[in-house]
């Protein structure tokens, strides 16, 4: 399972957590489009250097949207954790791994999605 948490850095509000078998550039664009329609378009997005974030399609779409991309240094996941303090994305990503992925067997992707969403809500609302 791949987990894509979307967090508003200033308010630390968790906007969503997409759970899929794999996340393509097309799926990322659909998720970002949905977030941009439901809240203010950000000046920047910060992400790792994964292929879905560095694809030409995503770069072009962000440029058209007027959003600049900030990338953490390769091999430096603590940069996203540091930018959000104890509620950092990398910290959140390790929690589902520790609490779910390493302890449970999922019958299907729907089971995984159903288990990650309550964890997201409790994590960012604690």
Image (cartoon, grey):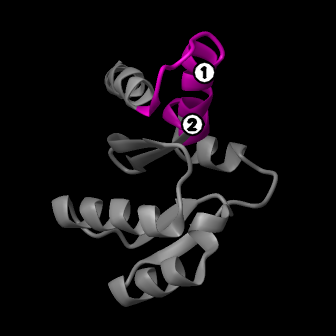
How far is mark 1 from mark 2, CA to CA? 8 Å
Picture quadrant where residue 51 is located: bottom right
Q: Residue at x 35, y 59 (%)?
A: 31
Q: Residue at x 26, y 61 (%)?
A: 34
Q: Residue at the front extreme? A: 107
Image: magenta residue range:
86-109
Label 2 crowd bin: few (<14), some (14–19), many (20+), radius 10 Å? some
Q: Please tell me whether the stretch drawn in magenta is mainly helix, strand or loop.
A: helix
Mark drawn on residue 62: none
Instruction: Note whether 66 is above or below 13 in the view shown.
Output: below
Q: Residue at x 41, y 49 (%)?
A: 6
Give the percent coordinates (x, y) of residue 38. 17, 59
- Quarter holding the C terminus is top left
Magenta run includes residue 91: yes
Q: Residue at x 61, y 48 (%)?
A: 80
* Left or right for 9, reference 38: right
Mark 1, secondary structure of its residue: helix
Mark drawn on residue 1: 2
Judging depth in this view, the residue of 42 and 109 nearest the camera is 109
Mark 2, secondary structure of its residue: loop
Instruction: Note whether 90 is above or below 10 in the view shown.
Output: above
Q: Which residue does the numbered mark 1 point to in the structure image?
A: 101
Circle 1/circle 2 CB separation < 8 Å: yes
Magenta run includes residue 17: no
* Left or right for 72, reference 1: right
Give the percent coordinates (x, y) of residue 20. 48, 44
Picture quadrant where residue 41 is located: bottom left
Label 1 crowd bin: few (<14), some (14–19), many (20+), radius 10 Å? some
Q: Earlier in the sequence, mark 1 or mark 2?
A: 2
């Amino acid at each position: 399972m791949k987990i894509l948490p979307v967090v508003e850095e200033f308010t630390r509000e968790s906007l969503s957590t997409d759970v899929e078998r794999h996340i393509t550039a097309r799926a990322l664009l659909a998720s970002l489009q949905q977030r941009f329609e439901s809240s203010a378009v950000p000046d920047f997005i910060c992400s790792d250097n994964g292929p879905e974030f560095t694809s030409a399609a995503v770069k072009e779409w962000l440029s058209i949207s007027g959003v600049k991309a900030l990338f953490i240094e390769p091999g430096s996941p603590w940069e996203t954790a540091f930018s959000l303090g104890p509620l950092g994305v990398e910290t959140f990503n390790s929690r589902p791994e520790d609490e779910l992925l390493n302890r449970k067997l999922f019958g299907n992707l729907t089971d995984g999605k159903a288990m990650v969403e309550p964890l997201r809500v409790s994590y960012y609302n604690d």
